[in-house]
Amino acid sequence: MSYGDERRVRGDLATGDQRRVRGDLAKGEARPTTSRSSGVMLAAGLALALLALGVTERALDARLARAAVNAPMFEVDPQWPKPLPNHWMLGSTIGVGVDSKDHVFIVHRQQTVRPDEAGAAANPPNSECCVPAPPVLEFDPDGNLVNAWGGPGQGYVWPESNHGISVDDKDNVWIGGNGNCPANNANPACPTGGSDSHVLKFTHDGKLIAQFGMPHQPTNSNSTTSFGRVAKISFDVNAQEAYFADGYGNRRVAVVDMATGAIKRYWGGYGEKPMDGPLPPYNPDSALIRSFRTPVHCAEPTNDGLVYVCDRPNDRIQVFRKDGSFVKEKQIAPRTLGDGSVWDIAFSRDPQQKYLYLADGKNEHIYVMDRETLEILTMFGAGGRQPGMFFAVHSIATDSKGNIYTTETYEGKRVQKFRYLGLKPVTAQNQGVVWPRRTP
């Protein structure tokens, strides 16, 4: 029933049916009992009709109120970034960060460019196309490539499998890794086994500043000297602290001094002491376990003293105060198995950081959420390879203008930009592919 139809029904009941009922009831006072019974039945029917109408009206009002909610809206920019030079090709694109000038940094895995994609890198080359791009690429706001660097160098160990890239308040670039080498393997980067248990900090243009943690250390979620396959680094600039989602081996958030790399504090699920060892498989019909699962995929501090943690395979966001005390949690798409639904988080750039953007690389959505309530206001994206679609959307970041950048791992192998269109009324919870509208 439309709103106009409902008003007409309500008007008819008020002006027609109700008058007839009143008249019948008035006349029926002098009639036999059977007439009074009929009047009572009619009155009861009218009451039920009015009650049903009230329920329908409340449901309609609820829908109208839902439609009146405003949320940030976006559209994909299919022309960003511009084509790469030198027949360069991206592998699994595993991190994105934005600097103070809205330059966008991505990091990808060269080794995931398949041999049949990299004929120009063969010895001898067997085709014009293609070669793996350097691991770190920097784009300006218009999508032009302005710098590229990274890989093994003197004085540090490049991760076996780089993971995540973040830019701090001084425009330094931090890179983690989630590689895990078996003992006695043939990989010269980690011949004794162990994992990417360290983090690298570079200048804006790729000169080493520091290596925090010792490479190739075993998993230990209570270590105070090394890490366990760090997924992502985020920053509390005022406190000069870095938050490590630590990560693929360990099961904790580690808070680190940004200058020295010293671990200042850490915690596991619900703010408890993290534990290593086997866990039961995730079961959406069972109670949530107390521990984080691996990977702990992000740990994002906010301006108002909270930390939002991606407990990815548990399909949940856990929220803490910066001292590690637990505040609340929220499951997202809790029947998502395997890789889980909670991959990465970014915030809107208003001072209150009112909105939270969540990347779900299994269901291929970006959720737009109210950060305080963790209510999903709307979502966009769908599985696929065209612009505005995703395959394994992995990382997410925002720039100063509110635009969103995403990267895709596995065979997604790309970066995308979603232009911020402002706050607009929500008309669909699932927007699907946010393709640009044609303009005259």
Image (cartoon, rainbow, N blue to C red):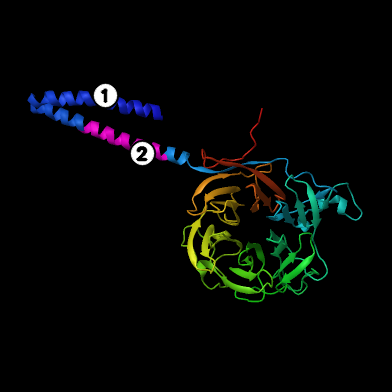
In the foreground, 7 or 157: 7
Query: Is 226 displayed left or right of 150 in the figure?
Result: left
Label 1 crowd bin: few (<14), some (14–19), many (20+), radius 10 Å: few
- Examine the rendering and report whether any part of residue 52 can be seen: yes
Task: Work out which quarter of the rendered image holds the N terminus and state it.
Answer: top left
| Residues rendered magenta in the picture | 44-62
Q: Position of residue 95 (x, y in %)?
A: 69, 56
Label 2 crowd bin: few (<14), some (14–19), many (20+), radius 10 Å: few
Q: Where is residue 8 in the image (x, y as percent from the top left)?
A: 34, 25
Q: Where is residue 40 in the image (x, y as percent from the top left)?
A: 16, 31
Mark 2 or 1, nearer chain start: 1
In the foreground, 130 or 424: 424
Write down the residue under mark 1.
15
Q: What residue type is labelled 1?
A: Thr
Q: Position of residue 36 (x, y in %)?
A: 12, 28
In the foreground, 254 or 341: 254
Write down the residue under mark 2.
58
Task: Provide the secondary structure element on which disc 2 rests.
Answer: helix
Task: Provide the secondary structure element on which disc 1 rests.
Answer: helix
